[in-house]
Image: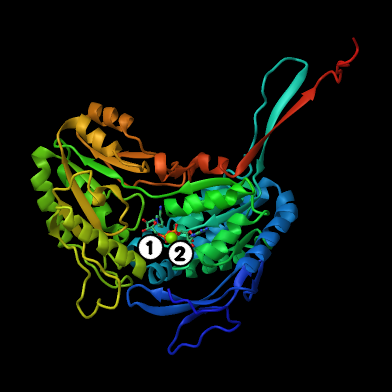
C-alpha cells in the first residue's frame, strides 16, 4: 500500500487505466473525504496499483457515525422487522446478481484465486436471506413468576455498529457482520482494510440499489490507526464487530473501554487438523492439503498444524509433497489457478520470515519455502506451497499464526497425545479430525478446545453454523442465531397486575 502523504483533495494521477473510487458512502450519498485522501490499492499479483480509492479520516468517520445514528433514531429504527426483512431479501437478490463481478474485484484486490472467490462470494446472498428470515422473529419470552406480575422480555438492537474487517476475505467478513446486524435493526459503519478497500465500496452500491434508507450502512475505507481507531473511540458507536489480529483487538479494547462498547472479536487460529492412522487417508489428505494452501494460507480457519499419527506419518508427508507439486500457483484471474499470491507485501515478508524461522528451528523443509521468481510471477507476492515435516509443537512455526501457505506436519502417538498437542496453543478457533472409529471421533471432538470441530470433513461453514473462537481466538460467535444475539440487547419488562405498592415508611 502506497500512502500518498498528506490528504489531498484530488486523486493522484496515474498512467494507464485504473479503477477509481473517489467518494466515500455516508448517509446514503457519495461524498469526497474531508480529512482522508486517496490511496492506491495494489494488485498483489503484479505489485502495481490497480485502483485509486478514497479513504476517510476521523472527521469522515464522525460524519458516518452521525449518519448511522440518525438512521437508527429515524426511519430505520421505527421500521418493522418484516420491512427490514424485505430490504435484506432485496439485498440478497442484487448481491446474487452481481456476485460474479464482485468475485473478480475481490480477486484483483486481495489476490485470492478467482475459482475460490467465486464459490465464496457466490454464497454470500444466503447470509442475507437467512438473516432476513429472522428479522421479523426477534421475539422475547414471557417469564412465569407469580400472579402479581406479568413479566416479558423484548429484544432491541444494540445501536450503531462499527464493523472493522481484514484483507484476507473482505466481502465474507463484511457479510458475516452486516447480515445479522441489519436483521437485528442496527445501523453500520463499515471500515474495510486499507489493503483491500474496493469491494466494500461495491457493496455500498448494492446497499443503494437494494433501497436501504440513508445512513443504515455507511462505508469508509481508511487506515486502522486513523479511521479504525476513530471509529472505536467514537462515543456514538455502541458496538465494534472486528475480524483481524489479536494485538489489534487488544488496542481496540483499550480504546473502546472509555465508552464501554460491546465487542465481538474474530481473531487468529492455529488449527490442529488431526489425522489418525485409521482414517480414510485419501479423504483426509484431500481436506488437509486443500486447506493448507487455499487462500494462500490466509485464513484463520485453515489447518496450519497437521497432526499425523505416527504409523501413517511418512506416507502423509510424502503425499503432502506430491500434492504440493499439483498446486497451480498463478495469476488469480486465471481460471486454472488454484492459489494466488499473498495479499500484500507485509504478509509476504511475514511468511518468508517464518519459513526462515522454521528452517533455523530445525524443521525439515520438504518442499516450497521460497518466493516464486519466474518472470511472469516475480513482481507479485507469490510463495510456493510449503511443507515442513519433523515439526514439534514447541517450534514457533507451530505456535504462531503465519497466514501463509505453510503446512507444519507434527507426528503423534495415540489419542491422548493428539489432544494434548491440539490444545497446547493459545488459540482455539477451529479443529479437524479424521478417523473411521465413531467412538474415537466423539471422544476426541469433545476434548478439543475450539469453537468449531470438524469430524471427517473440514471448513464446512454456513450462515446457520456458529463460528468463533475460544481462548485467544476471539469473543463471541459469528453466524447462526448466536450472531444475531450479539447485535441485540434484552429488556425485561415487569408489569404489576395489581398496581399496589407498599409504603416503605408506613410503620
Ligand atoms: P489487523 O488486525 O491490523 O487489521 C485488521 C483490520 O483492523 C483492518 O481493517 C485494519 O485497518 C484495522 N485496524 C488496524 N489497527 C487498528 C486500530 N488500532 N483500531 C481499529 N482498527 C484497526 O491485521 P493485519 O496487521 O493486517 O494482519 C496481521 C496478521 O493478523 C496476519 O498476518 C494474520 O496473522 C492476522 N490476521 C487474522 C485475520 C483473521 O481472519 N482472523 C485477518 C487478518 C489478519
Ligand atoms: Mg496490523
The N terminus lies in quadrant: bottom left
* Residue bearing the label numbered 2: 99
The answer to whether residue 432 shows anywhere in this view is: yes
Mark drawn on residue 118: 1
In the image, residue 266 above or below residue 92:
above
Query: Whole-percent x and y of residue 297?
Result: 30, 58
If the image is split into quadrants, where does the C terminus sit? top right
Q: Is mark 2 within 8 Å of ligand 1?
A: no
For the point 52% across and 46% down, the residue is 264
Considering every residue shown, the one lying at the far right of the view is 506
Image point 48% across, 50% down: which residue?
250
From this viewpoint, which residue is outermost toward the bottom? 15
Ranked by sequence position, the earlier of labels 2 and 1 is: 2
What crowding class fits label 1: few (fewer than 14 Cα within 10 Å), some (14-19), or many (20 or more)? some
Instruction: Locate residue 316, reporting x and y percent.
Output: 13, 47
Q: Residue at x 62, y 49 (%)?
A: 258
Q: Which residue is more in the foreground, 269 or 77?
A: 269
Q: Can residue 213 be seen in this snapshot?
A: no
Q: Secondary structure at mark 1?
A: helix
Q: Quadrant of residue 145?
A: top right
Crowdedness of circle 2 by 10 Å Cα count: few (<14), some, many (20+)? many
How many marks do you count on the picture?
2
The x and y percentages for residue 414 are: 16, 31
Residue 334 falls left or right of residue 2: left
Q: Are marks 2 and 1 in contact (CB under 8 Å)?
A: yes
The colour style of the image is rainbow
Q: Residue at x 42, y 79 (%)?
A: 50
- Quadrant of the picture in which ligand 1 is shown: bottom left
Q: Which secondary structure, mark 2? A: helix
- Residue 501 falls left or right of residue 419: right
Rendering coords of residue 17 (x, y %): 44, 86
Amino acid at each position: 500500500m502506497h500512502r500518498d502523504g498528506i490528504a489531498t483533495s484530488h486523486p493522484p494521477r496515474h498512467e494507464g487505466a485504473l479503477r477509481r473510487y473517489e467518494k466515500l458512502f455516508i448517509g446514503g450519498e457519495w461524498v469526497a473525504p474531508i480529512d482522508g485522501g486517496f490511496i492506491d490499492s495494489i494488485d498483489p499479483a503484479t505489485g502495481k496499483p490497480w485502483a485509486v480509492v478514497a479513504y476517510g479520516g476521523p472527521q469522515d468517520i464522525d460524519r458516518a457515525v452521525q449518519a448511522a445514528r440518525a438512521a437508527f433514531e429515524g426511519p430505520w429504527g421505527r421500521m418493522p422487522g418484516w420491512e427490514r426483512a424485505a430490504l435484506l431479501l432485496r439485498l440478497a437478490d442484487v448481491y446474487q446478481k452481481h456476485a460474479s463481478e464482485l468475485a473478480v474485484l475481490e480477486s484483483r484486490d486481495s489476490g485470492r484465486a478467482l475459482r475460490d472467490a467465486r464459490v465464496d462470494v457466490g454464497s454470500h446472498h444466503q447470509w442475507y436471506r437467512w438473516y432476513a428470515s429472522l428479522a421479523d422473529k426477534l421475539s422475547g419470552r414471557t417469564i412465569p413468576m407469580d400472579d402479581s406480575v406479568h413479566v416479558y422480555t423484548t429484544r432491541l438492537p444494540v445501536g450503531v455498529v462499527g464493523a472493522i474487517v481484514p484483507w484476507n476475505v473482505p466481502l465474507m467478513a463484511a457479510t458475516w457482520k452486516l447480515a445479522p446486524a441489519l436483521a437485528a435493526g442496527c445501523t453500520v459503519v463499515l471500515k474495510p482494510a486499507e489493503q483491500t478497500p474496493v469491494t466494500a465500496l461495491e457493496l455500498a452500491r448494492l446497499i443503494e440499489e437494494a433501497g436501504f434508507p440513508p445512513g443504515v450502512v455507511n462505508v469508509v475505507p481508511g487506515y486502522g490507526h486513523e479511521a479504525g481507531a476513530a471509529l472505536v473511540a467514537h462515543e456514538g458507536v455502541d458496538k465494534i464487530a472486528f475480524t483481524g489480529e489479536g494485538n489489534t483487538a487488544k488496542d481496540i479494547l483499550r480504546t473502546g473501554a472509555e465508552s464501554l462498547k460491546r465487542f465481538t472479536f474474530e481473531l487468529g487460529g492455529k488449527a490442529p487438523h488431526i489425522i489418525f492412522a485409521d482414517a480414510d487417508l485419501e479423504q483426509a489428505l484431500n481436506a488437509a492439503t486443500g486447506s493448507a494452501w487455499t487462500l494462500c494460507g490466509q485464513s484463520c480457519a485453515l489447518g496450519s498444524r497437521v497432526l499425523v499419527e505416527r504409523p501413517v506419518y511418512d506416507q502423509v508427508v510424502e503425499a503432502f509433497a506430491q500434492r504440493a507439486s499439483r498446486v497451480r500457483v498463478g495469476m488469480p484471474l486465471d481460471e486454472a489457478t488454484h492459489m494466488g499470491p499473498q495479499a500484500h507485501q507485509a504478509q509476504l515478508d511475514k511468511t518468508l520470515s517464518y519459513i526462515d524461522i522454521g528452517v533455523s528451528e530445525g524443521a525439515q523443509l520438504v518442499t516450497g519455502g521460497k518466493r516464486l521468481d519466474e518472470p511472469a510471477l516475480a513482481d507479485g507476492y507469490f510463495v510456493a506451497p510449503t511443507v515442513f515435516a519433523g515439526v514439534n509443537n514447541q517450534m514457533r512455526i507451530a505456535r504462531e499464526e503465519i497466514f501463509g501457505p505453510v503446512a507444519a506436519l507434527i507426528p503423534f502417538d495415540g489419542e491422548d497425545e493428539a489432544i494434548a498437542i491440539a490444545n497446547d496453543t493459545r488459540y482455539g478457533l477451529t479443529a479437524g479430525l479424521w478417523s473411521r472409529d465413531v467412538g474415537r471421533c466423539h471422544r476426541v471432538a469433545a476434548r478439543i478446545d475450539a469453537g468449531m470441530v470438524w469430524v471427517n470433513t473440514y471448513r464446512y461453514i454456513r450462515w446457520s453454523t456458529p463460528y468463533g473462537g475460544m481462548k485467544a481466538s476471539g469473543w463471541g460467535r459469528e453466524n447462526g442465531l448466536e450472531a444475531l444475539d450479539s447485535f441485540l440487547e434484552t429488556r425485561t419488562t415487569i408489569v404489576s397486575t395489581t398496581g399496589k405498592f407498599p409504603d416503605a415508611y408506613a410503620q
